[in-house]
Image (cartoon, helix red, strand yellow):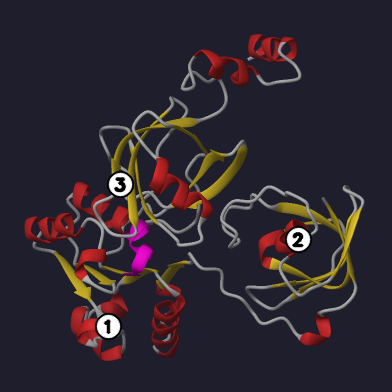
C-alpha cells in the first residue's frame, strides 16, 4: 500500500488508473470497471448486457443494485441497475437487464451503442433490498415491469441453492413479449416443484392485484416473507393489503420510481444558494438536484431517486422537505440527498 501511495504521488494530479487505462482500460489498481461481453436486444424496449468486471468485483447479494458509469460526449453519467444474475454465478459475471426509457439518456445510449468490448465504470453492489442471509421458510416475490430485475436475481439464487421452501414468483407486465427471460422463468418452474411462476397481463386479461389474487397464488402469504419491486400503483396496492393484515414488517420493498410528496405552494419561495459555486436561484419547488442543474451546475448524481447517495451534499443552513416522506429537516451542516430534497424558503447548499 505504501508503494501504491508513492506511485500515486508521482502521478499527481491524475490517479494512477488514468495512466493505466491508456495502456489497457481493464488494467486498474483502485477503480473498478467492467467489459461488455454480451448484448441482447431481443425483448422490445429492453437491453440485456453481460459484463465481465475487473478483479476488484467481490460479488453481490441477490436483489442489490450496482452503479454503472457511462461516458457520453465526454461527460460521465452514472445510473443504478439491479443485476439479474444469481449471487452464486460461477462465471464471475454481471448480467443487467435495462429498460430503455424514451427520454433516458443513458439507457438509450446503451441500447444504440453497446457492443462487446465496450468498457464501463462500475461500483460495488449495494442496497438493503436483498435476500436475508438466513432464508425464510416461505417466500413470495412480486414484481411489475422493469421491477423484475432484483426479484429475478433472488429467484435464480434460490434455484441455485436448491431452496426447498414454497416460492411464488408473481409478475405483472403489459404483454408476454415484454417479459425478459420469460423462457428461463418457465424452465425454473418446471425444474423446481416448489417454485410457482405466475404471469399477469392486466391490460389483456383484466387481472390486477388484489386480496383475492394474493390468497389465490399464495394462501400462506401471512407466514411468508414478501419481496416487492414494481411501479407505484402495484406497490401501493400490495402495501395497503399488508398494512391492513398487520404484516408490514414481512414486506420488503425496493423503489425504482421515487415516490414524491406534493410540495406545498406556501413552501415555494425564497432563494436557494449554492455557496461553493457562488450561484443563487429562486426556489421553484423542484428537487435541489433539478434546481442546481437549472442553474447551470453539474452536481454528481446516479439514480435520481434517493437510493445510491451519489448526489449527497451538505445543507449549510435553511430548511428542506424530504420529497419521499414530506418531513421538514432544518439541522445545519448536514449531508442530504439532493434528488429527494426540495428547498423550503432560503437554503444554502454547499455545491
218 is higher (above) or lower (below) than 14: below
> Quick one: label 3 or label 2, which is nearer the N terminus?
3
> Quick one: label 3 or label 1, which is nearer the N terminus?
3
Q: Which quadrant: the N terminus?
A: top right
The answer to whether residue 65 of the structure is visible from this angle is no
What residue is rendered at 8% in x and 62% in y? 193
The residue that mark 1 highlights is 203
The residue that mark 2 highlights is 294
Query: Dot 2: what SS?
Result: helix
Q: Who is closer to the viewer here, 194 or 78?
A: 78
> Quick one: label 2 or label 1, which is nearer the N terminus?
1
Query: Dot 3: what SS?
Result: loop
**Quadrant of res 342:** bottom right
Q: Who is closer to the viewer here, 218 or 14?
A: 14
What residue is rendered at 46% in x and 62% in y? 102
Magenta segment boundaries in residue numbering: 143-151
Question: Which of the numbered marks, if any, corresponds to residue 85?
Answer: 3
Horizontal and vertical percent position of residue 171: 27, 70
Amino acid at each position: 500500500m505504501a508503494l501504491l501511495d508513492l506511485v500515486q504521488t508521482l502521478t499527481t494530479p491524475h490517479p494512477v488508473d488514468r495512466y493505466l487505462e491508456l495502456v489497457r482500460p481493464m488494467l486498474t489498481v483502485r477503480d473498478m470497471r467492467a467489459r461488455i461481453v454480451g448484448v441482447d436486444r431481443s425483448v422490445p424496449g429492453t437491453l440485456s448486457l453481460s459484463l465481465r468486471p475487473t478483479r476488484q468485483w467481490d460479488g453481490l447479494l441477490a436483489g442489490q443494485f450496482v452503479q454503472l458509469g457511462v461516458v457520453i460526449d465526454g461527460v460521465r453519467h452514472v445510473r443504478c441497475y439491479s443485476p439479474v444474475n444469481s449471487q452464486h454465478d460461477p462465471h464471475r459475471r454481471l448480467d443487467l437487464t435495462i429498460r430503455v426509457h424514451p427520454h433516458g439518456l443513458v439507457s438509450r445510449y446503451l441500447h444504440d451503442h453497446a457492443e462487446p468490448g465496450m468498457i464501463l465504470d462500475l461500483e460495488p453492489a449495494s442496497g438493503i433490498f436483498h435476500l436475508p442471509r438466513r432464508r425464510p421458510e416461505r417466500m413470495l416475490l412480486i414484481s411489475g415491469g422493469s421491477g423484475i430485475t432484483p426479484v429475478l436475481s433472488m429467484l435464480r439464487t434460490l434455484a441455485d441453492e436448491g431452496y426447498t421452501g414454497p416460492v411464488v414468483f408473481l409478475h405483472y407486465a403489459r404483454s408476454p413479449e415484454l417479459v425478459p427471460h420469460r423462457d428461463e422463468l418457465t424452465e425454473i418452474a418446471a425444474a423446481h416443484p416448489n417454485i410457482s411462476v405466475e404471469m399477469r397481463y392486466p391490460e389483456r386479461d383484466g387481472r390486477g392485484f388484489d386480496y383475492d389474487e394474493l390468497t389465490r397464488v399464495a394462501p400462506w402469504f401471512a407466514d411468508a416473507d414478501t419481496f416487492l419491486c414494481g411501479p407505484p400503483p402495484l406497490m401501493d396496492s400490495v402495501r395497503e393489503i399488508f398494512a391492513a393484515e398487520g404484516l408490514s414488517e414481512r414486506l420488503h420493498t425496493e423503489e425504482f420510481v421515487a415516490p414524491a410528496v406534493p410540495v406545498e405552494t406556501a413552501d415555494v419561495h425564497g432563494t436557494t444558494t449554492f455557496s461553493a459555486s457562488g450561484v443563487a436561484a429562486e426556489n421553484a419547488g423542484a428537487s435541489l438536484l433539478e434546481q442546481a442543474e437549472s442553474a447551470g451546475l453539474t452536481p454528481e448524481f446516479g439514480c435520481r431517486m434517493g437510493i445510491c447517495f451519489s448526489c449527497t451534499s451538505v445543507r449549510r443552513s435553511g430548511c428542506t422537505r424530504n420529497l419521499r416522506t414530506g418531513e421538514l429537516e432544518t439541522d445545519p451542516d448536514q449531508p442530504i440527498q439532493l434528488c429527494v430534497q426540495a428547498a423550503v424558503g432560503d437554503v444554502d447548499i454547499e455545491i
